[in-house]
Amino acid sequence: MALFLDGPACSIDDLLDEDSGLLGTAQTVGINVTAKLRLAMSEVQSELETLLLRLQSSTGTGLILPPAIGQVVVTPDLSRWEKMQALTMVYRDASFTQLIDRYKGKWDVFTKLTQAARDQFIANGIGLVTDPMPKATLPVLGTVSVTGPQIGGTFYACVTWVNGAGQEGSPSDAGSIAVAANNRMTVMAMAPPASAVGFNVYVGTVLAMMTLQNGTVLPVGTSFTNVPGGSSSSQLPGSGQKPDFVKPLPATIMRG
């Protein structure tokens, strides 16, 4: 599972699974669906921050601060809420632009589904992590010459940050590099989170088959040199941290 702040919790393909006519509508009306995904995330974030503030409490010794938005994990309930919010925004704009009843009908349907998804999320609680590891940024790839024969080729690589509990954040986007014969690829993870203790490297000659290359977590700030065939691991990049705990949320009325 990814952290909420890693980016939109759903993709255009996820929206199409729910509404196959989405792209046709977007093309007809001139709607940028990618922009709506970002706006839906922003709208849900605003609601989440309000819900988190309601978890603030006080004791005889002082104030207990609420969890931060950076600790929130995308659970299936949260992902569905964000997806329904995006579809609502698409058909709201389509309805305002074209004034066509079928767009208004879909707007109404997805508005109700958004409310239901939000209510379900609140009923099941919010997933949180104690030490969040954000999605890693694109790694810096390079090459280094080696003595002895070394077959070159095109290699793909991504990285993940690891915290003190051994939890991995979401993998970075994959970078690629053409490595000449008698050279090896180098990988550097950039912009480490403050609490990261190290990073993992996943490499492959096929984008969908990148596997873990390092046997132990690599120290922050170091460069990893990939040795083709040097790892027998079949571990693929994960999807990020799972919740450490689920916090109950107070029922609230959705803003109009």
Image (spheres, rainbow, N blue to C red):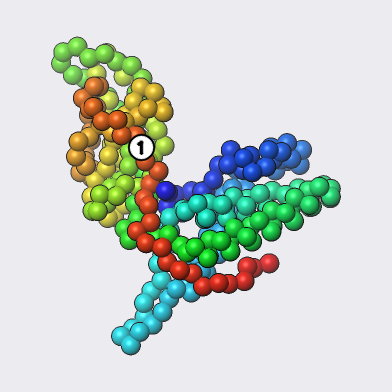
Most extreme residue toward the bottom is: 60
Mark 1 residue element: loop
Q: Is residue 38 left or right of residue 94?
A: left
Residue 201, x across and y down, in percent: 29, 35
The structure residue drawn at horizontal position 33% and vertical position 16%, both measured from the top left corner, is 153
Q: Is residue 136 left or right of residue 116?
A: left
Quarter occupied by residue 111: bottom right
Q: Nearer the viewer, residue 27 or 59?
A: 59
Q: Mark yes or no: residue 215 visible.
A: yes
Quadrant position of the C terminus in the picture: bottom right
Residue at 52 percent across and 55 percent down: it is 77
Q: Is residue 205 above or below residue 64?
A: above
Q: Amino acid at mark 1?
A: Pro
Q: Position of residue 55 (x, y in %)?
A: 44, 73
From the viewer's side, name the closer residue of 174 and 76.
Answer: 76
Q: Is residue 176 visible?
A: no
Image position of 196 (left or right of 119)? left
Identify the residue position indicated by label 1 in the image: 237
**What is the x, y in percent for residue 226?**
24, 27
Residue 255 location (% of width, % of height): 64, 68
* Front position in the image: 140 or 39: 39
